[in-house]
Amino acid sequence: MSYLVKTLRTLCVLALALVFAAPATAQQVVQQAVPMPAPQALLSPEATAALEAALAGEMAGDLPLLGRGFLFPSMQGGGTLLMMGFRLGESGLMFGADTAAVDAAQDAAPAGTMAPETAGVEIFGSVRAAGVEVRRIGTTAKIPKATGDGAHTATFSFGDTLPAGSYEIVWGVRDVVSGKAAMRRDALEVPNFMTGGLQTSSVLMVEGNPMQAPGVFQPNSVYHGVRILTASFMDNLTHEFSKSTPSVMLVFLVSGAQSDATAQAPSLELEYRILDSAGERIWRAPPQALQRATVGQQIPLGQINVLEAGNDYVFEITAKDLIAGSDTVTTVPFRITE
């Protein structure tokens, strides 16, 4: 069994352990309108027209839309898993009572339960390599109201597996009631986690508890939070945090480390530092030994007194493979607000 497969199975175990520690109420939310078990990209005529216009250079911008791509080793058929997180401005969405949700849960719901408010949206797009489409995105979801920060919804995500290479993703979200839409164009360099040597995946900056992710991961599906295997994590995508934020959890995977023949596990050492905008190191945590390749490290932001509102900072993460004698450094920018 290859080390990467063992690593990914370990990640699955970690995700399950995190989910079991999370409150039951975290199992919420996105109701899919996608054929199962093998979802295909489904686009309305309106979404098709918006995508064609975006590919020609005309980007719709009627909805506030935040997006960030995350890259992880894929457990399904090799390659790299791209998860695109997104948040929508609530002011641009048409919310309505979701009576179907109450009807579906009427046996368990107390009498007089109010129907939750949701907005129906369509997510669509094109993943392109050298100007040629390699994936088509098309699905729908119901987004619940008042689950984010008041201005934007909570984070949701969709994704697919891709071979290593350079990609451009032209994608958008459309409110199915009002017809308002927003488009983005994101460029991504997708690494090869199988042969790239010691490296880390994208780093999530997580607030709150992880959530159990329903079913098996599928493309053309929408998930609450950024999904990794059996768990989803609430990254706010902006990587801006109030000075009163007590802590954030850095979640990532280290790949390419050698495994000890006896313990059948890696021997890693992780160091965490914070750099200011001039590149000066202003905080560090003691080096930490780790014998697994999955990381969920809490950082006590609220206790780091040198962080000042209005300033930009960088997490510097150094991962050392103590068996191979190699190391890799990853940087993750963030900002402190009032």
Image (cartoon, helix red, strand yellow):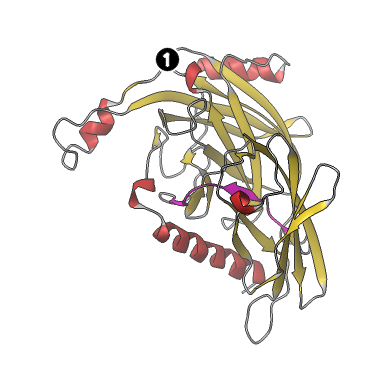
Q: Is residue 278 above or below residue 177?
A: below
Q: Is residue 204 magenta?
A: yes
Image location of residue 191, percent across then percent down: 75, 51
Quadrant in which the C terminus appears: top right
Highlighted range, magenta: 200-212
Which residue is at a point 73% across and 64% down the rendered structure image? 271
Q: Is residue 109 left or right of residue 314?
A: left
Q: Is residue 36 above or below residue 253?
A: above
Q: Above or below — where is 225 with respect to 215?
A: above
Instruction: Give percent across and percent down for residue 292.
Output: 62, 71
Identify the secondary structure beneath mark 1.
loop
Q: Residue furthest bottom?
A: 262
Q: Is residue 335 within the magenta segment?
A: no
Question: Which quadrant is home to the N terminus?
Answer: bottom right
Q: Is residue 292 left or right of residue 19?
A: right
Vertical placement of residue 108 versus 80, above or below:
above
Q: Is residue 188 visible?
A: no
- Towards the viewer: 268 or 5: 268
Q: Position of residue 317 (x, y in %)?
A: 74, 58
* Residue where numbered disc 1 is placed: 177
